[in-house]
Amino acid sequence: MTISDMTLAGTIQELPDELQREVEHFVEFLLARQRRAELERTAVAHSWPAGFFAKTAGSIDDPTFVRGDQGVAEERLPLE
């Protein structure tokens, strides 16, 4: 039986567990890549420079860079 004779899901189910997990990870990778491409198109459509978020997200790689103390938020009256 060839792959064309079976459904994709059936073909994957025929694989050993380890290979099934590998296929799942690959599909997750492809979906994440597709999502990043969609987000990039959306950002460019909203006038952000192409590649801006990919270049800036996680760009601070200095291990000594930490978020400082934020203090204590003031107590406010409850909404009625």
Image: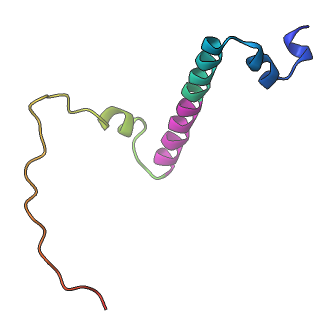
Q: Quadrant of residue 14?
A: top right
Residue 15 placed where, x, y %? 72, 12
Extreme top residue here? 1
Extreme bottom residue here? 80
Closer to us: 20 or 60: 20
Q: Is residue 9 left or right of residue 25?
A: right
Magenta-tinted stretch: 31-45
Image point (55%, 41%), residue name: 38
Image point (64%, 15%), residue name: 17
Closer to us: 3 or 47: 3
Residue 22 placed where, x, y %? 59, 16
Closer to us: 38 or 67: 67
Determine whether 60 is above or below 11 in the image: below
Determine whether 3 is above or below 41 in the image: above
Q: Is residue 76 magenta?
A: no
Image point (59%, 21%), residue name: 26
Residue 63 placed where, x, y %? 13, 28
Image point (13%, 68%), residue name: 73
Q: Quadrant of the N terminus?
A: top right
Q: Is residue 39 magenta?
A: yes
